[in-house]
Each structure stands twice: as C-alpha cells, then as structure tokens.
Amino acid sequence: MDAYLVEGPCKIKGEVVVSGSKNASLPILAGCLLTEDECVIENVPDLADIRTMLKLLHLLGRESTREGDTVTVRGGKLVNHEAPYELVRTMRASISVLGPLLAKAGKARVSFPGGCAIGPRPIDLHIKGLQALGAEIEIHHGYLNATAGRLRGTNIHLAGPFGSSVLATDNVVMAATLAEGETLIDAAALEPETVDACRFLQAMGADIEGIGSSVLRIRGIAKLHGCRYRVIPDRIEAGTLLSTAACTGGEVFVRGACATHLERVLEIFRSAGCTIEEQKDGIRLQGPDKPRPVEVETLPYPEYPTDMQPQLMALASRAAGISVITERIYPDRFIHVPEFNRMGADIKLEGTSAVINGVDNLEGAPVMASDLRAGAALVLAALSAQGTTKVRRIYHIDRGYESLESKLVGLGANIRRFVEK
Ligand code: EPU
C-alpha cells in the first residue's frame, strides 16, 4: 500500500494550479447517460473516483477517452442498468447514475451504499424525490431496484434533517429533465457543484430555471443532446492548497481558484490571521506565524463546508488559544482527531464539536488517513510539524486529489510517496 513520508517543518512558497472539480465532474459524467449523443467534458481531474465513474459508464455501455483534462463520453445506447456493489462500495457518488438510468432506461439496479468513514450517509432524499416523480423503488439483497414508466413532473420538498443534499438534488434534477411536465424542487442544494451540474444539463438542452437558488423549476423535454462543457475549478482542492501556506506560515498563489466559491472559507482563514488577496486569475494567501483561534460550524453552502473541516483543524491545532469546530453536516466526521493528537495536538470531542487547544508545535508521527479530506489534513499538519510524519492509507487521498504530492513538491514541500511492504 502507498504511503507518504513528509519531512517538516517547511514554509510553503510558490504557485500552483487548481484542477477541475471532482464533485462537479462526477454527477456531470453520470448525466451523460441522459443522451445517446457524444459529450465532451473539459477540466475533469484525473483521479481514482473519476476513473471509477468512467468504469461504471463503461459497464452501462458508454465508452470514454481522455486527452489531457478532457474526457469524451462517446455516444451510444445503454446496455445495462446496474451499478454493482464492487464499484459503489469504493465510491458513493455512483448513486448519481440512479436518476439518469431511471429517466433514460426506465429501470435501475444500484447497490445500496452503506455508511462510510465520515458516518452514516443516508439516501432517503434520493429515494423520496425519485418516488415523487413516479418511480417504484424497492430494496432487496443490498440493492435498490427502481422502475418507472415515463417519469411525471411534480412538486418535491428535498430538505433533510441536515439541510439540503447535493447528490440528491443532482439525481432528482437529472431525472426531471426528461419527465413529462414540470417539476418544482424546493430546498435544492446551493453548492457550486450542483449549479455546475444544472448548467451542464442546460448545455444538453434541459429547461431549468432558478439555478443557484433553493427553488428549481424543471420543464421536462423528450430528448437531450450532446454538448461540450467545462467543469468549474475544485473549490475544496483550492482550499486545501491555500491551507498549505496557512498552516506553514508560507505564501501560495492558487491559480484558477474561484474566490466567490470560497467566500466563507476565506473569511474564516482571514480571521485566523491569514492575509488573502482575491485576484481575477486566482487567490494568494500568506499564512500567519502563529494562527489565531477560530470558531466555526460546518453547514451547507454558502456556509463553511464540511469538506474543509479537517484542514481547518490542522490550522487551529497550532493556534494561540482555543478553537471550536462544530460539525452540522456529518456529526461523526472526527475520526482524524486521534491522529492529530498522535502528532501532539490537544483536541477533545464534545458531542458534535471539537475543542482544539492550540499547541506551540506539532510533532511528526506515524498516522493513518481515514478518509479523503482527513488524509489531506494530516499532510497539512505534517508540513508544519517538527520531524518526519508517515501518512498511511493514502489511497483515500488519491480518490480525490490530482497529483497532490507533485503539486506540494512544486511548492517546496519535502514529501515523497513510497510503497509500504
Ligand atoms: N442526507 C440525508 N438524506 C439523503 C442524503 C443526504 O439525510 O438522502 C444528509 C447527509 O447525511 C448529510 C447531508 O444530508 O448530513 C448532506 O449530505 P449530501 O447528500 O449533500 O452529501 P452527498 O451529496 O452525498 C456531497 C459530496 C461530499 C460532501 C457533501 C456535503 C460528492 C460526490 N460528494 O456528498 O464530498 O461532503 O456533498 O457537502 O459530491 C468529499 O468530497 O470528500 C465528500 C465527502
């Protein structure tokens, strides 16, 4: 299994280019199933989750090729309607083929995704939305079996106990584009990735109003066509790359980062003492010698994202005072806390809050990535720590960051990948 060896401390300095958004690309690639025409998607990052989605499209009958950051999903008919356990197990976003398969083939068999390292991840909102459109859905032997004649537009309230859902909104919108009549979704997700998926569907000819608001009106049409579409930059990768300088007191320019997608993140990083310049072509961040403590709750967009929670913890662990970070999206997303504490951090959990008593210095230690963002945050902590950190299970990081170590080496980090026997 691959692992990282990181030698700290270092002061990050330089410029790096942000890749295309993983979480926008995944539903967009699934959305290609809504047409039999070819779709050309630009700015798709080359990482494990994307390769898994392309494998799934292949199983469903759609071939794809990649040239640089452009993925072409060739035209063709669906030959299958099943997303098997082996793929869904490695990537929950496979659930986003459910809506397109139902709308296009009238049937779908998708492995029921279980919980994961960041806690339970229910799919009741996906089911509720698709049932409202007329699908019949049963769960047997670990699979969701869904069937439908032509879906019918209707009014759907998509709020869950933790607010809106990104992939449930995407799934229901995708299904509604080919339904008969009008669908009105309220409590739709506002995340830039959902906005991007809707714009992609518009480029395919879909009739969607209210994009970027919590109420989406979709007028179903009979057929969508192929298109060429460019995916937005990855705001979470951009935030993680900015965090390298925030955590090490260094300076970084993240070319291509979009400040409007990161407003709340930048506000919190400023409150922690970072100096940030928002430019037309990217974001520059100068980290503080000693961060100030922060108090933050994760919430749906435009509030502070849960996918930037562990990275902020890496920063807060060295702050001059006590920080409190509360999880309002995934109450159990704290498996990284004991790993930070192995590196000398002083973090206690109180319910769904982490209370972080800033320490002078972190120390290198052997640690283990438990999920994608936790893994990235351990690398951030390692960059600022005294001595050597070995980060194991970096396959989690490979799922969602394109070429992380080469980007970090370009910024002056001492990090290398090795194969652990
Ligand atoms: N929820 C429900 N019922 C549902 C679906 C969600 O109660 O049917 C709850 C969840 O338990 C959670 C909240 O709603 O408390 C939001 O979950 P959401 O459905 O928005 O998550 P998701 O769409 O499955 C996407 C990202 C995640 C990111 C979340 C929240 C993709 C592929 N994944 O997941 O990204 O954390 O939105 O912003 O877009 C990551 O990239 O590391 C990652 C985990």
Image: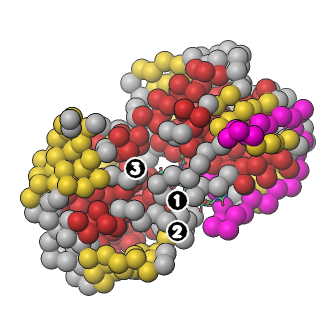
Residue 165 image offset from top left, x and y in percent: 64, 56
Q: Which residues are magenta?
A: 140-166
Sooner in the amino-acid sequence: mark 2 or mark 3: 2
Work out how far the residue at label 1 is from the one at label 2, CA to CA, in angstroms: 7 Å
CA distance for labels 2 and 3 = 17 Å
Q: Quadrant of residue 83?
A: top right
Residue type highlighted by circle 3:
Leu
Which quarter is ligand 1 in? bottom right
Work out whether residue 376 or residue 262 is closer to the camera in this orientation and state it: 376
Residue annotated with mark 3: 372
Give coordinates of residue 163: x percent, y percent: 65, 66
Is residue 236 in sight in this rendering?
Answer: yes
Examine the residues drawn in magenta and state their main secondary structure. loop
Q: Nearer the viewer, residue 1 or 379?
A: 1
Give the position of the C terminus as an image quadrant.
top left
Q: Name the residue at 86% across, 35% down.
A: 148
Q: Which residue is tagged 1?
A: 119
Queried whether the magenta region covers residue 158, the answer comes back as yes
Please state if 195 lies on the left or on the right of 322 as rendered. Answer: right
Q: Residue at x 67, y 46 (%)?
A: 170
On screen, residue 340 versus residue 229, left or right, reads left
* Numbered disc 3: secondary structure: helix
| Residue at mark 2 | 331
